[in-house]
C-alpha cells in the first residue's frame, strides 16, 4: 500500500486547506453557501486519518464516508469529495452547509448520500462526527430482524438499542435505496433519535459521536460486536448481553481510554 | 508481494502489445484466425489490472480468468495465456476469435475453459467483459440449491436471479467438470440467458458486464453478497432481500459510481 | 507497519531499562513502593515482543495487556504503561508491586485493570506471566454457557476446564465490567484457581503461564481452539474432545516445543 | 515479513546442501545410516518453498512439516530439523532413512513426529512427498464424524474418501496424541491405505502426493474444501458432492495445471 503515495499528504496541509475551504472573495449566489473559514488543521488531519482507519479496520471498502462538524461553525460540516475513502487526502475535504450544499464545489463531485450527514448534524447538536458504512458483519442484522445488542464491554455504547431504518417505509414506496435528498436524511435522523447507531435495511448503517475518535471507535466495535454476536447466537440461543446499567457505567469508564486505540490507528494510517 | 516484479510491467506497453497482437504478415491458415489489430493500450492495462484486483479481493486464487471483448472487433476477445492471474502482464494477453481459437499462439498455452468467454461473447452482444472464478463464498450456493439473492444495494445487480449450471445435465453424462469445448460453452451461455451471473455446480461461477470495471465490481460484490447472505441465513430463516424494483433503481444509481472503487483498486493493483 | 518505527526499539535498551526501573535514590513515601532493581533485559525484550506477537496473532487489538513477574523479586511485576500493545517498547515497561502500585510512575498512566495481574501473582506463586485480552473468538463462549474445551492437542492445556468469571456475581451488583480494584482482582484470581485460563463474562479472558513464551502460546491456542470448537459445534452436536489423560500427556510433550513458534513469532515481531 | 532475512537463502545453496547431506567420510556406526549423497538442489529448493507456501496459504502455522523422498535413493527422505516451517532454509534440511533415523544429525533436533513421513514412504512407494499439518478448517472434521467430501473440482482428489485415524484406537490406550514412534507411524500409514489424505482425531491431518507441487496443492485445497463444505452444510443438509466419476476425470484434467498455482506460490514464497 505504500505505493499509492500517502506519505507527505499533509505537506503544506494547513495552508492548502485554508486555501481550499475559504473563498471569501466569491459571492454566495455563484458558488453556494458562505464558508465558515478554514477548519483546524488538526481536525482535517483526523478526518483524513479516520477515512483510512475505517478501511484498515474493515468498516469501509471502496464506499462509505465519514464527516466532522466544522470546528468554527456548527452549521457547516466537512466531508471528502466523492472518492474511495482509502484515497482521501486533506485536499479532498469539502465544506458543506447543513442542507448539504457544497460551499465551493469547483467541479468536485459530492457523495450522493451526503444528506445523511447534514440532516443528522441538524437534528443532533451533540453530534460532531458521522460515519456511513456498509460494515459487512452488520448488514445481516439489518435484514433479519435480529436486534444488534452489546455482547461485551467494548460495544457498551449500543445499550440504547439499535433501530433499523427501512427506506421503503420512510418514503412510502420503492426507492433506489439511497438517502439522496434532505427528506430521506431527515427521516433517517428521526429514526436514529438520541441513539449512537442505526442500521439501514439492505444497505448499511450510520454511527454518530461527539468526536472523530469516538465515531471511529464506535464504528469499529459495532462491526466487531456484530461478528461476535452472530458467533454467540450460533453457539446458543441463550446469550447474556450487557445489562443496560453495566453498559452505561462501562461506557463512561471507556470514554477516557479512546486515545489508546486512536493513537495506534492514526499512527498506522498516516504511516502508509 | 512487491518482490514479484510488478512495477514497470507496462514499460513500453503500447508498442509491445501492438507487436504481440498484430501479426499481419502471417497467413491465417498457418497461425489461426486473423488479428483485429492491436487493442487499445488502456483496455489491455485495465485487463491486466482486473486480473490482479480480483486476486486482491479474494475472488481469484491461482486459478480463474478474466477477459475483455476486443475494442476494434466484436468478433475477437482478449485473455491471458494460461498462468496464475496474479502474474499476468500485458505481454501475456492473447487474442482469440469467438470460437476461442488463438490468433497467434506462438507456443503459449491457452486456458482449457476459454470457451466460456467465446460462447458468452457470441450469445450476448451486450457483454464486453467476462470473469470465470471459483470465488469461495459463492461455491456453497452452487451445491445446495439455496438461491443467491441480493441482500443489499451493492449486489442489486443480482435481481434477475442467479441460475445454477449443472454440467452433468448439460452434457447428459459424467464430465471432467470443465467447460472445455464450444458445445459446453454454448450450453452455459444459454443457461446464463440475459442475466449477469451464473453459478456452476461443484465448480464456480461466471460474471459478465458491459465493461471491465463493471465485471470486476460485480464479481467482488457477488462474493461479498454470498458471504453476507450465508451469515444472514445463519441468523434467521426470514431474510428480507431487495425488492426487484428497488434493485433495478439502485443498479442504475450505482452505475455512475463504479469509478470510485475502480480507481482505488487499480491504483493498488498496479502499485504492487 | 514498518512505518511506525519499531526497529531499533531496543537500542541502548538494557541501560535505559535499568535507568527507568531502578530509582534507588527516591523515598518510597514519595513515589510508591521500592524498586526491585532492573529486570533482566532479556525478560523486558520478551515482554515487548509478547505485546506485539499477541497483536500479530489476533489475540490483542488496541486493548489488552501482558505482564511478567519481575525476575529479581517475586513481589514485583512488569507491565506497560497504558498504551496500545502494538506500540509498546522497553521504555514503556513499568514496575508494580503486587498491590499494583507503580514503583515509579513519573506521570505515566497505568492500565485500569492492572489488578488482574497483581492479584493473580499473589494467589499463584507458580505464575510468572499473565495475559488479559478480548481475544475475539473466545468472547462468545463467555456469554453463552457453552464450555470451552480442548478440541485438539495444541490446546490440551485447557483440560482442567475453563471457568467463567461473572463480575456481577463477584461484586454483588452492577459494575462497569472492569477489574479496577484489588478486591475484584482477588475474586477473579479465586475463580481462576489452579487453572490456566478463565473467561470473563461480557468482557474477555485471562491466561496465565510459567513463562512469557508459554502464556503467549496458551493465549494464541485458546483463541484458535475457540474458533475451531465453534466450527465443530456447527457441524455436529457430537464433538469428541481430548480425554483429560491424553491432554495431560500431550501438554507435557508439547512443553518442550514451545521454542519453535516462539522463535518465529519473536523474530517477526521484532523485525517490524 | 521481509525482515526475517529470507532473501538469499539459497546463496551457495547447491554446494552447501551437498556438504550438509553427504558425509561419506563418517562411518555409519557413529552417526546413523549412510547418506544417499546430495539431493538435487531443485528438490531442496522446492522443499524449502513448500514450507513457506504452506504457511502463506494458512495450512501450517508454527507447527507441522513437509518432506520429500530423496531423488537419488527411495530409501531416504528429506525433512527440516525441528523449527517453524516459515523459517526453514536449505541448510535446515536433514536426510533420514525410512526408519526415520537421521543420517547426520550433528546435534540438530528432529521433529518428534517424523515417523509419519518414514512409515508412509515405506508403505506407499508411489508417494514422493508428505505434509503433516494442523490445517485449521480440517480439524473440526476430525472430531465430529462428519466425513470430508469433495465439494468442487479443485478438491476432486478427495474422492476415495478421507478416513479418520484415532490414535487411541491404534495404540489401545491413552497416548500423548503424537505419532512419536515407528509403530504409530505404521498404524497411520495402514489407515491411510491408497488414499491421498487422512485426518487425525484431535490433531490434524496427513496429505501425500507424487511430487512437492502436488502435495502442496492437495494440502491447500483440502483446507479450502473443509471451509467450503462447512459453509455448505450450514446452508443446507442437502449438499451435492462431486460424483466419484466426475472427480476421477477432473483429477486427471487438473493434474496438467498444477504448475500454474505452483509458479505463483513459489515466486511469492521465495521473494520474501
Image: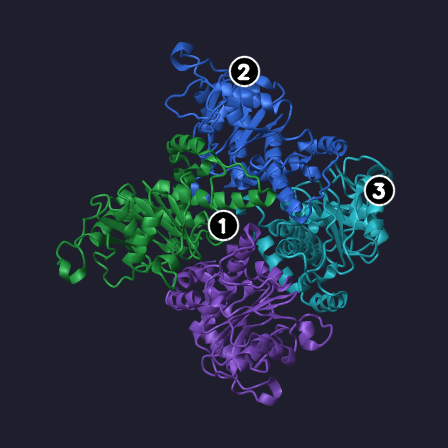
Chain colours: A cyan, B blue, C purple, D green
Asked if residue B60 is positioned above or below residue B234 in the image, the reply reads above
Tell me the SS state at disc 2. Answer: loop
Residue carrying label 3? A170
Residue carrying label 1? D137
Question: In which chain is the residue bearing label 1?
Answer: D
Q: Position of residue D50 (x, y in %)?
A: 37, 47
Residue D251 can be seen in this image: yes
Q: Quick check: C135 left or right of C214?
A: right
Depth check, front residue: C195 or C137: C195
Residue carrying label 2? B75
Tell me the SS state at disc 1. Answer: helix
Q: Residues within 10 Å of mark 3 (few under 14, many from 20)?
A: some
Asked if residue A109 is positioned above or below residue C3 in the image, the reply reads above
Using the numbered discs, state the Cα–Cα distance from disc 2 to disc 3 in whole angstroms: 48 Å
Asked if residue B250 is positioned above or below residue A196 in the image, the reply reads above
Residue B263 can be seen in this image: no
Mark carried by residue D127: none
Question: In which chain is the residue bearing label 3?
Answer: A
Asked if the residue at tag 3 contacts the one at tag 1, i.e. Cβ–Cβ closer than 8 Å, the answer is: no
Amino acid at each position: 500500500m505504500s505505493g499509492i503515495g500517502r506519505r507527505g499528504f499533509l505537506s503544506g496541509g494547513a495552508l492548502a486547506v485554508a486555501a481550499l475551504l475559504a473563498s471569501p472573495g466569491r459571492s454566495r449566489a455563484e458558488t453556494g453557501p458562505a464558508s465558515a473559514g478554514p477548519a483546524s488543521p488538526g481536525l482535517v488531519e483526523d478526518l483524513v486519518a479516520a477515512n483510512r482507519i475505517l478501511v484498515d479496520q474493515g468498516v469501509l471498502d471502496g464506499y462509505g464516508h465519514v464527516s466532522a462538524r466544522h470546528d468554527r461553525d456548527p452549521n457547516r460540516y466537512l466531508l471528502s469529495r466523492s472518492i474511495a475513502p482509502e484515497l482521501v487526502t486533506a485536499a479532498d475535504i469539502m465544506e458543506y452547509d447543513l442542507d448539504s450544499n457544497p460551499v465551493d464545489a469547483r467541479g468536485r463531485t459530492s457523495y450522493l448520500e451526503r444528506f445523511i450527514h447534514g440532516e443528522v448534524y441538524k437534528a443532533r447538536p451533540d453530534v460532531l462526527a458521522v460515519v456511513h458504512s456498509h460494515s459487512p458483519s452488520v448488514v445481516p442484522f439489518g435484514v433479519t430482524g435480529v436486534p444488534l445488542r452489546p455482547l461485551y464491554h467494548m460495544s457498551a455504547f449500543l445499550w440504547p438499542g439499535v433501530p433499523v431504518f427501512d427506506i421503503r417505509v420512510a418514503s412510502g414506496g420503492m426507492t433506489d435505496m439511497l438517502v439522496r435528498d434532505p427528506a430521506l436524511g431527515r427521516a433517517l435522523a428521526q429514526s436514529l433519535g438520541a441513539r449512537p447507531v442505526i442500521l439501514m435495511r439492505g444497505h448499511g448503517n450510520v454511527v454518530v459521536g461527539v468526536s472523530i475518535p469516538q465515531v471511529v471507535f464506535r464504528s469499529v466495535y459495532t462491526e466487531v460486536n456484530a461478528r461476535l454476536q452472530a458467533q454467540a447466537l450460533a453457539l446458543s440461543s441463550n446469550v447474556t448481553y450487557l445489562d443496560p446499567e453495566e453498559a452505561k457505567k462501562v461506557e463512561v469508564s471507556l470514554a477516557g481510554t479512546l486515545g489508546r486505540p486512536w493513537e495506534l490507528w492514526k499512527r498506522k494510517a498516516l504511516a502508509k
